[in-house]
Structure formats: structure tokens, C-alpha cells
Amino acid sequence: MAQADADSQEGALYGCDLPALTPHTLGSQVELDAERKRIRSSGVARDHEELRAGTSPNSTHVWLGGHVRATPSVTAPVGRLALKVSDYVAALLDCARRPSLVPRRARSRQPAYRG
């Protein structure tokens, strides 16, 4: 969602409640906008116990031909991730830069409908 244009982002969230699932869940449009900006800048989405307490998923996109073809992710317990977060993020970004690591089926799919 962070990579989508502003109209698509607004449309996806229009009229949606964003209930807090943990004490770390983003609680305002300002926080969500800041997080989307950070994701666009770094290329990595990081969930800091926002969905489930005790876990921290991290993901990125694999772009091929101008379209997202895969979204590799790593989820680890917060304590373990904190020790090696830079290693996990580096591995994700390396995977995204090396399309040969993406299964052939994902590389050949047609782009998703962007209606």
C-alpha cells in the first residue's frame, strides 16, 4: 500500500475503521502517513508488534517489469529480531534485488488488476 499512488491509498482506507489490535497499533492518519513515507524511503515494511504482540514481521517487494511480483517477508519474535534486525533487512533487500530468488511462477504472473 505504501507504494500505491495517493488516490489508491485514500480509496483503500476510505470509511475503514483501523482498530487497535495491540498497544503498538498505529492510531491516527498522521502516524499511518508517516509510516507509509518511511516504507517508501527504506523499501522495507516493518511491523513493530502492531498486529500481534511479541512478533515483528518485515517485508519488501520484488519489482519486475514495473509490477510487484513477490513480497518476501521474515517474521521473528521481537527479542530475536532486535538482535539481528539489520541482517534480516539486508537479506530481504538482497532477495528483492535478485529476481532469480523469486520462484519462476511468481515472475511470470500477469500484473494484478489495478481497477
Image: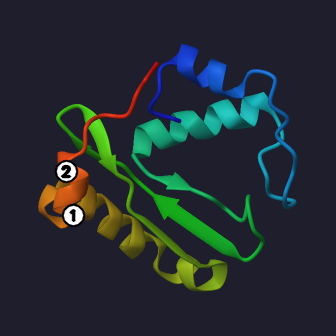
Outermost residue on the top side: it is: 7
Residue at position x 87%, y 45% in the image? 19
Q: Which is nearer the eye, 15 or 39?
A: 15
Identify the amino acid type marked 1.
Pro
Q: In this view, does 14 lie to the left or right of 2?
A: right
Q: Quadrant of residue 36?
A: top right
- Look at the picture and state if 111 lies above or below 77: above
Corner quadrant of residue 72: bottom left
Label 2–label 1 contact, CB within 8 A: yes
Q: Residue furthest left?
A: 100
Task: Identify which residue, 46 or 115, lies in the foreground.
Answer: 115
Mark 1 neighbour class, 10 Å CA radius: few under 14, some 14 to 19, many 20 or more: few
| Crowding near the residue tagged with mark 2, few <14, some 14–19, many ≥20 C-alpha atoms within 10 Å | some
Q: Give coordinates of residue 33: x percent, y percent.
A: 65, 30
Q: Helix or strand or loop: what does disc 2 sit on? A: helix
Q: Residue placed at 79% from the left, 52% from the top?
A: 25
In the displayed structure, 70 sits above or below 40; it is below
State how the image is colored. Answer: rainbow
> Mark on residue 107?
2
Residue 115 in percent (x, y) is at 46, 18
What percent of the width, then of the height, locates residue 66? 23, 31
User: Where is mark 1, residue-wise?
Assistant: 103
Where does the image place residue 45, in percent across and percent down from the top left?
Answer: 51, 51
Identify which amino acid the numbered label 2 is placed on. Answer: Arg
Residue at left offset 52%, top offset 83%:
83
In front of the other: 32 or 4: 4
26 relative to 2 in the view: left or right: right
Q: Residue 68: give its label.
A: none
